[in-house]
Amino acid sequence: MKNNRPRLKLHLSYSDIIIEALSIIVLVTLAVITVVSYKNLPDIVPVHFNLAGGADRFGSKKEIFALPLIAIVIYTLLTILNRYPHIFNYPTQITEANALQQYTNATKLLRYLKLIIVSIFLLIFYFTTKAADAKNTTLPSWILLLAFASVTILIITFVAKSLKKTNK
């Protein structure tokens, strides 16, 4: 039962602080280069790409601000959620004995996920602006593969770690 789970105050490890700092650096970089790049963009830019990487919607260059805004919202929501690990779903029952290990593992997962997400947004921004400047309206196909693979590997790794800690 989620209601009976212990509520613990987790402390950030050195690696947690590094991951958080990297995420913030990437997020700030995305915001800054969006503002700096804006004036040099053509009036119409690709704003959505299909699974093959081809632009399937074009819009005003003002729409480019959606990328950092969405990244900031996702980052903020995941940061808030990370304060409440007792409400997460776990592949095992949470007890007083395993709560610290499970919560620590789960919050690390979200920290890495934030870094991956903001990094993918930065890559998308970079290639979107390149596509707009070069009049080439395709993104490299490896971006979607990278996003899918990195999130999948991250989740599998942390679920396996969660199950392993339970068996100890």
Image (cartoon, grey):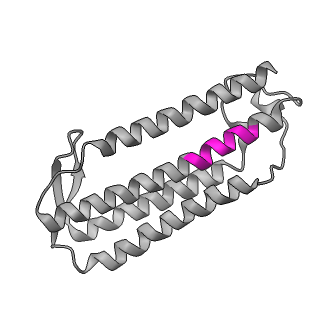
Residue that protrudes farthest toward the top in the picture: 167
Q: How many numbered badges does the structure rendering display?
A: 0
Query: Where, quadrant-wise, is the C terminus in this rendering?
Result: top right
Residue 148 is covered by the magenta coloring: no
* Residue 23, percent from left and from top: 55, 59
Q: Is residue 141 above or below residue 80?
A: above
- The part of the chain drawn in magenta is 103-112
Q: Quadrant of residue 60?
A: bottom left
Q: Which residue occupies 74% across, 56% down?
A: 14
Horizontally, residue 112 falls left or right of residue 96, namely: left
Q: Is residue 157 above or below residue 74?
A: above
Q: Which residue occupies 22% across, 50% down?
A: 139
- Which one is in front, 1 or 97? 97
* Residue 127, percent from left and from top: 27, 58
- Asked whether the viewer can see residue 39, the reply is yes
Horizontally, residue 118 falls left or right of residue 53, namely: right
Horizontally, residue 8 falls left or right of residue 42, namely: right
Residue 109 is covered by the magenta coloring: yes
- Which one is in front, 112 or 93? 112
Horizontally, residue 20 falls left or right of residue 5, namely: left
- Most common secondary structure along the magenta stretch: helix
Query: Where, quadrant-wise, is the N terminus in this rendering?
Result: top right
Q: Which residue occupies 39% across, 60% down?
A: 122
* Residue 30, percent from left and from top: 42, 67
Q: Which residue occupies 25% across, 60% down?
A: 128
Q: Is residue 111 above or below residue 94?
A: below
* Residue 17, percent from left and from top: 69, 59
- Which one is in front, 87 or 42? 42
Q: Quadrant of residue 19?
A: bottom right
Q: Is residue 51 above or below residue 131?
A: above
